[in-house]
Each structure stands twice: as C-alpha cells, then as structure tokens.
Image (tube, rainbow, N blue to C red):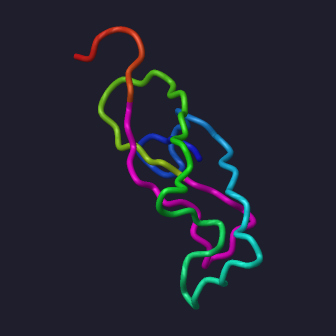
C-alpha cells in the first residue's frame, strides 16, 4: 500500500507498506460461490486491525491516492476492502 499525491503514480509520501493477507479458510469450510470474493477476503468480525503509514510532511492542497499493488494477483482478485481512511496529525496544532 502506498500514499501518493495528485495521481496514482504521483509523488510517494507514504509507504510502501506490505499488507499480509490472512490465512485461507480451513478445509472443512465451504468454497465460495461463483463470483464471490476469494478466500483471502476477511469480512465481519474478523477484520484486520488498521494499518498505519507515516506520511512525509506536505504543504498545499492535493488529491491523495491510496494505491494497492500486487504483481501476482489475478485480474479477478480483490486486493483490498477499504472501510475508511483517517489522517492524524502528530504534534503541533491543526490550523
């Protein structure tokens, strides 16, 4: 996962951070239905804890892109279920 400015291939201001998928379901669990998310997707109460990424200090107004890459993923694979994004400022005051 990467955080970039102004374009998906713009200036890298955070990351890259490697996200490790959860283990596949046990063999006794039913296989997902046709078109359902792959076994690596975690839903419900089993969501992974938040991922934190340090951001390079930046000034001005920018579009911010959260970019997920997986060179071995198939086109039909889901890379991420993004529930929310929160920007926290450490130190100082928020203008």
Residue 83 sits above or below residue 11 on the image:
below
Q: Residue at x 54, y 49 (%)?
A: 9
Quadrant of the image occupied by residue 58: top left
Q: Which residues lie in the magenta part?
A: 68-87
Q: Residue at x 62, y 73 (%)?
A: 77
Front position in the image: 28 or 79: 28
Q: Residue at x 38, y 27 (%)?
A: 88
In the picture, measured across the screen, residue 31 lies left or right of residue 12, that is right
Q: Tell me the chief SS of the magenta region.
A: loop
Q: Can residue 76 be found in the magenta stretch?
A: yes
Figure label count: 0
Indicate the position of residue 59 as horizontal and vertical percent values: 36, 23
In the picture, measured across the screen, residue 76 lies left or right of residue 85, that is right
Question: Please, which residue is most extreme toward the front here?
Answer: 28
Residue 82 sits above or below residue 43 on the image:
above
Indicate the position of residue 34 as horizontal and vertical percent values: 58, 91
In the picture, measured across the screen, residue 11 lies left or right of residue 83, that is right
Q: Can residue 88 be found in the magenta stretch?
A: no
Q: Residue at x 59, y 66 (%)?
A: 41
Indicate the position of residue 85 as horizontal and vertical percent values: 39, 43
Indicate the position of residue 53 as horizontal and vertical percent values: 54, 33
Question: Please, which residue is most extreme toward the top here?
Answer: 92
- Position of the C terminus by quadrant: top left
């Amino acid at each position: 996962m990467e955080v970039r400015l102004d374009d998906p291939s713009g200036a890298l201001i955070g990351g890259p951070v490697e996200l490790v998928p959860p283990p596949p379901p046990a063999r006794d669990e039913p296989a997902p239905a046709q078109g359902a998310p792959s076994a690596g997707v975690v839903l419900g109460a089993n969501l992974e804890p938040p991922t934190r990424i340090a951001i390079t200090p930046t000034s001005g107004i920018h579009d911010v892109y959260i970019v997920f890459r997986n060179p071995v993923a198939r086109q039909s694979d889901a890379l991420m279920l993004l529930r929310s994004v929160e920007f926290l400022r450490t130190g100082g005051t928020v203008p």
